[in-house]
Image (cartoon, rainbow, N blue to C red):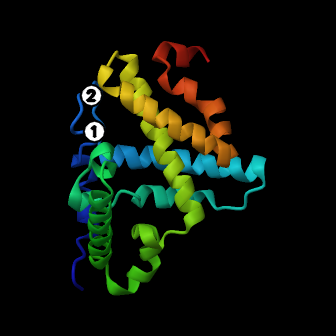
């Protein structure tokens, strides 16, 4: 049986640095990011189901989040401002991401590809779940930003402004985001001593 390189690509995700163009007090890699996004997406879905009449599968949301940056195994992390500063550049980069996702999918045995395609290729992801993962992605980036600002890292002031605006927009259309923020966000930047007291 021919060996698949799929897992080899996935296991390289810890080598891919996020926020590479910015000074960071705490480094973060793509694997860590995806894990945190998966936890947040899972919780957002549970909140949506329990408090706002949703009917989604939290496990599916978490799994989608684990794979949502798979294109970066081939492209590495791209700064958001760079990616979205010009519509033509954005369109071209989205094509590259799609190609990278399909290349990753193609490394799997053929009989597994149809099962994995709606998890890996973002254009095939169910839009409802994609929205949950995107919201989780923004929340995770906001938590990272708040932690950097806690250490007086001025590089993240403009990031906080942009992400705070996005979160306010999400709160209008996704009540589970507002609920998550009210329950969890403040404690994400707590010190160990404060956490131990709770």
Q: Residue furthest front?
A: 87
Position of residue 145 in the picture relative to residue 45 (left or right) = left
Nearer the observer, 116 or 155: 155
- Measuring from the top left, give residue 163's x and y in whole percent: 46, 36
Whichever of callouts 2 and 1 sits on the residue coming sooner in the sequence is 1
Residue at coordinates 33% horizontally, 57% vertically from top-left?
A: 87
**Total of numbered circles in the picture?**
2
- Measuring from the top left, give residue 106's x and y in whole percent: 29, 79
Residue corresponding to mark 1: 19
- Measuring from the top left, give residue 67's x and y in whole percent: 40, 60
Q: Which mark is residue 63?
A: none
Cα distance between the residues tagged 2 and 1: 8 Å
Mark 2–mark 1 contact, CB under 8 Å?
A: yes
Looking at the rendered structure, the secondary structure element under dot 1 is loop
Pointer 2 local density, CA inside 10 Å: few below 14, some 14–19, many at least 20: many
Residue corresponding to mark 2: 24
Position of residue 129 in the picture relative to residue 11 (left or right) = right
């Amino acid at each position: 049986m021919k060996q698949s390189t799929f897992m080899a690509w996935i296991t390289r995700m810890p080598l891919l640095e996020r926020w590479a163009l910015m000074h960071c007090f705490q480094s973060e890699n793509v694997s860590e990011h995806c894990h945190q996004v998966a936890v947040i997406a899972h919780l957002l879905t549970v909140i949506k189901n329990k408090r706002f009449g949703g009917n989604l599968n939290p496990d599916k949301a978490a799994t989608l989040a684990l794979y949502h940056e798979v294109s970066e195994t081939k492209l590495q992390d791209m700064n958001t401002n760079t990616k979205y500063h010009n519509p033509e550049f954005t369109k071209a980069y989205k094509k590259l991401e799609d190609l990278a996702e399909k290349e990753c999918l193609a490394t799997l045995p053929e009989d597994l590809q149809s099962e994995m395609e709606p998890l890996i290729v973002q254009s095939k992801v169910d839009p409802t779940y994609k929205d949950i993962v995107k919201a989780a992605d923004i929340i995770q980036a906001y938590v990272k930003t708040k932690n950097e600002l806690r250490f007086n890292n001025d590089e993240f002031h403009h990031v906080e402004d942009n992400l705070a605006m996005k979160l306010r927009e999400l709160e209008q259309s996704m009540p589970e985001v507002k609920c998550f923020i009210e329950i969890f966000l403040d404690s994400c930047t707590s010190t160990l001593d404060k956490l131990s007291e709770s």
